[in-house]
Image: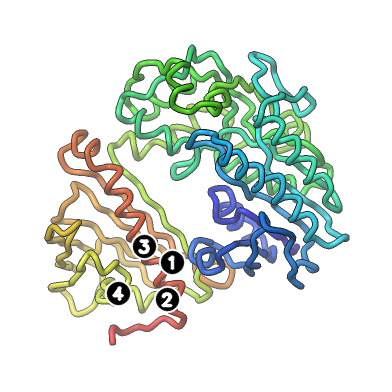
Amino acid sequence: MRILITGATGLIGRELGKVLAEKGHDLYVVSRDQAKARELLPFPCEIIEGDLNAGPLHDSRLAKVEAVINLMGESIAGERWTEDKKKRIYQSRVIGTRHLVQSLPEDLKCFVTSSAMGIYGDQKDTSLTEYASHGDDFLANLCKEWESEAAKAPGRSVFVRTGIVLARQGGALDQMLFPFRSGVGGILGDGKQWMSWIHLKDIVGLYVFALEHHEVEGALNGGAPHPVTNREFSETLVQSLGTRLGPAVPLFALNILFGELAKSLVASVRMQPEKALSLGYKFHYENLLEALSEICLPFKMGEEIFVAEQFVPAPPEKLFPFFKDAHNLERITPPTLNFLIEKMSTPEIGQGTLIDYRLKIHGVPAKWKTEIDEWQPPFKFVDNQLKGPYRLWHHTHEFRPFCGGTLLVDRVRYRMPMGFLGWLVSNRFVRKDVENIFAFRRRYIANMGTLPTKTD
């Protein structure tokens, strides 16, 4: 099937795109920045450049589209709802969806759009199925208009009312981890409000389910079968992290910090996925402790984990020669790090090779020694720090055959020196550094065309 995705570079979009591509679908992605999208998307697709906030798109490829997954939208959380912020939220969801619908062919088969559990408003302990009444605040009215625009699309329409998505990197949990790992994260208000959560794997699964099952139509609650109160969520999170619960955050403090947004942060939404269950969807994670334990295991062990993915339209055996040349590491590392290999224990990288190099971290000189402790050409190798600035640095490079090309997967596990104090002081800064390093690497790989195998 030919499927158009908006918001594809977001948390859900990246995972969903991989699943759909692996199923053999032809994917089209709408993006305002084609080059940036090409760097970030971990799956093969055609990119249609355009801004749906500004108006409908006019691209001949849209006539081929058979189904749409609409994930675009300005982030709702993270900052106060100023009038300008609310306008951007409305424009990106309601107006953007209107323009998207106007861009589509008349014979479209299916239009699946994201919506939000906020459509129900604060309904205390009421169990909310897809047929429950709606709220009447900013977020609820936004969702109603959002779904109304999506319903105008040709063919079958589905509105996935998404709960709090739990994932290791990105999403709401990413914002919670630092205070809860620090031991200062606590319940919000009295903690009695209900939270509808869902694991990333299941929200992706529900989108695929909605796309593939013609009997799915209209509202679809995107939450796990067992929502929990805020107190239960907080207690389960600290259990999964091996930390302790901090003091409660009173409502007046939330109002001071977030203004109108605070009302949505403590809204009680006890959403039940009645339609998904009745139509046969099987959840991977029904239990919160199981979901959070899977996500938080590295953090409980005192480790950080970072994962970067990139699709390259060439097979692993063509890519691997570039990456097995140690000096090419210098080329794909930001110049600001002054990365330089000083010596290697073998003429070429292989199992057991020791590599000594030097670099500068924010201008401070540092020496590093790594060992290649796993070598499986052309699919995988691992370098492990023996001496360097971290207590642990374990970098797995994977070259997965994927949709006729390669999914490059970099998985880094690292641990700061000086234990908890070192983590507390430098965690956010180090993570930003790691993100910048791999952002540079993605840009380099996306722009270099035919991969060279030599450094000259």
Q: Name the residue under label 4.
A: 331
Circles 3 and 1: CB atoms closer than 8 Å: yes
Name the N-terminal-most of marks 1 and 4: 4
Circles 2 and 1: CB atoms closer than 8 Å: yes
Label 2 crowd (10 A; few <14 / some 14-19 / many >=20): many
Does 187 sit left or right of 143 as displayed?
Answer: left
- Local SS, label 4: helix
Foreground disc of the pair 1, 4: 4
Give the amino acid type for the residue marked by disc 3 in the picture: His
Question: Residue 240: x percent and y percent?
Answer: 40, 28
Give the amino acid type for the residue marked by disc 1 in the picture: Phe
Question: Residue 356: x percent and y percent?
Answer: 14, 67
Give the amino acid type for the residue marked by disc 2 in the picture: Leu
- Quadrant location, the N terminus: bottom right
* Separation of marks 2 and 3 at Cα, in angstroms: 12 Å
* Separation of marks 1 and 4 at Cα, in angstroms: 19 Å
Q: Mark 3 points at which residue?
A: 397
Give the amino acid type for the residue marked by disc 4 in the picture: Arg
